[in-house]
């Protein structure tokens, strides 16, 4: 099996009937680039920049420090597309140098894009670093935890301000930077037809989308049996998001754990997902699976799955169909 994976390096990720998908990697630091290359990642689908902030002890990372980190990833990946997610702090992710008030429900609280729109100084520093780094590769910027059109438009407004500043300072940046958002909150999925008009791409974050759709804390072991990627409500939301984006001619990725899951890949492929971003070690196994599947058959399979009422039924159907 190992050997058959080695042989897939440098190969395309393409179904038996010719549908191409992009298999990208999730990373948390420029040090992870070697793992991406080793596993033949076709890009980065999620660079979680919060680690850059969490690794600091006494202050936010400066614009310069951030610029260097983003540049290292962009250059290290040789012009492959790199999705860098803006700061997703809060919830369980704290910073030693930034005091946050204790909250009753931190996962429903002051975090990610909410914090960035409130603290534009922090947000702008990151956006400046990102756009400055954009000349070194193919950058895609992504906002986490968007729950409404207002938030998306506000975030894009901050980008405009930053670009005006860079223009005034005669600082160069690429003019083909794609701007997208995560779909990880049900309210965003529900209005994805509207949001799709204002972005270049979506990336579905199933880790949080499952948590928020099913009202199941993703860390709570006691209710982990309720946290299920095959939940039909979650699958219907995913399908809806992909269809809504495609109607606007936009592409859709997934960077939650489900994207690299061998049982989920056939379903997601059938739903029309364009990019799968996963832990680098899952990339070659995913390519092996995708290269063995027919897109037309998976579309039918996906439709059958969408008609099912329980996660158990769906999972058993997947297992039976693919001998898992
Ligand atoms: C997600 O929610 O699926 C996701 C990719 O983001 P994180 O796991 O960093 O919350
Ligand atoms: Mg998330």
Image (tube, helix red, strand yellow):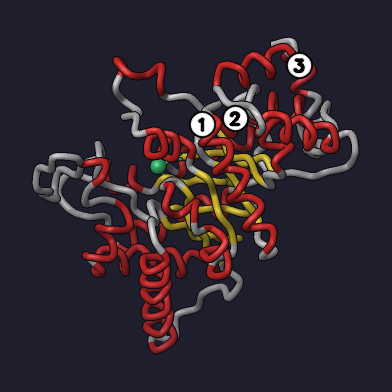
Residue indicated by mark 3: 321
Asked whether the beta carbons under mark 3 and mark 1 sit within 8 Å of each other, the answer is no
**Where does residue 107 sit, x and y in percent of width and height?**
26, 41
Give the distance between the C-alpha atoms of the residues marked 1 and 2, in whole angstroms.
Answer: 6 Å
Whole-percent x and y of residue 97?
Answer: 13, 48
In the image, residue 68 sits, relative to residue 34, either above or below, namely: below
Instruction: Report if the CB atoms under discs 1 and 2 are less than 8 Å apart.
Output: yes
Mark 3 or mark 2: which is in front? 3
Lower position in the chain sequence, tag 3 or tag 1: 1
First in sequence: mark 3 vs mark 2: 2
Which residue in the structure is indicated by mark 2? 260
Residue 77: percent from the left, percent from the top?
A: 61, 48
Which one is in front, 294 or 228? 228
Q: Point out the quarter of the image occupied by ligand 1.
A: top left
- 188, above or below 255, in the image: below
Q: Nearer the viewer, residue 243 or 274?
A: 243
Label 1 within 8 A of ligand 1 by Cβ: yes
Measured in 3D between alpha carbons, the distance from the residue under mark 3 to the one under mark 2, in whole angstroms, is: 18 Å
Q: Is residue 275 left or right of residue 160?
A: right
Could you tell me which secondary element the residue under label 1 belongs to? helix
């Amino acid at each position: 099996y190992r050997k058959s994976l080695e042989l897939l390096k440098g190969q395309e990720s393409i179904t038996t009937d010719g549908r191409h998908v992009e298999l990208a990697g999730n990373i948390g630091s420029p040090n992870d680039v070697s793992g991406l290359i080793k596993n033949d990642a076709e890009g980065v689908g999620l660079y979680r920049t919060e680690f850059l902030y969490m690794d600091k002890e006494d202050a936010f990372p400066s614009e310069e420090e951030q610029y260097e980190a983003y540049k290292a990833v962009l250059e290290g990946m040789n012009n492959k597309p790199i999705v860098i997610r803006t700061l997703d702090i809060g919830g369980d992710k704290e910073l030693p140098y930034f005091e946050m008030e204790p909250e009753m429900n931190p996962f429903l609280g002051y975090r990610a894009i909410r914090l960035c729109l409130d603290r534009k100084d922090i947000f702008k520093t990151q956006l400046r670093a990102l756009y400055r780094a954009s000349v070194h590769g193919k950058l895609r910027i992504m906002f986490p935890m968007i729950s409404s059109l207002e938030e998306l438009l506000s975030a894009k407004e901050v980008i405009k301000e930053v670009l005006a500043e860079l223009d005034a300072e005669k600082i160069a940046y690429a003019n083909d930077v794609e701007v997208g958002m995560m779909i990880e909150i049900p309210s965003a999925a529900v209005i994805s037809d509207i949001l799709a008009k204002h972005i270049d791409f979506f990336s579905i974050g199933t880790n949080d989308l499952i948590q928020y759709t099913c009202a199941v804390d993703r860390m709570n072991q006691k209710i982990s049996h309720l946290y299920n990627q095959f939940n039909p409500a979650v699958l219907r939301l995913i399908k809806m998001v992909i269809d809504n984006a495609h109607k606007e001619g936009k592409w859709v990725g997934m960077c939650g754990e489900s994207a690299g899951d061998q049982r989920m890949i056939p379903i997601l492929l059938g739903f029309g997902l364009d990019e799968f971003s996963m832990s680098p070690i899952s990339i070659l196994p995913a390519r092996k699976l995708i290269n063995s599947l027919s897109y037309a058959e998976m579309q039918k399979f996906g439709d059958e799955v969408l008609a099912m009422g329980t996660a158990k039924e769906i999972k058993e159907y997947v297992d039976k169909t693919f001998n898992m």
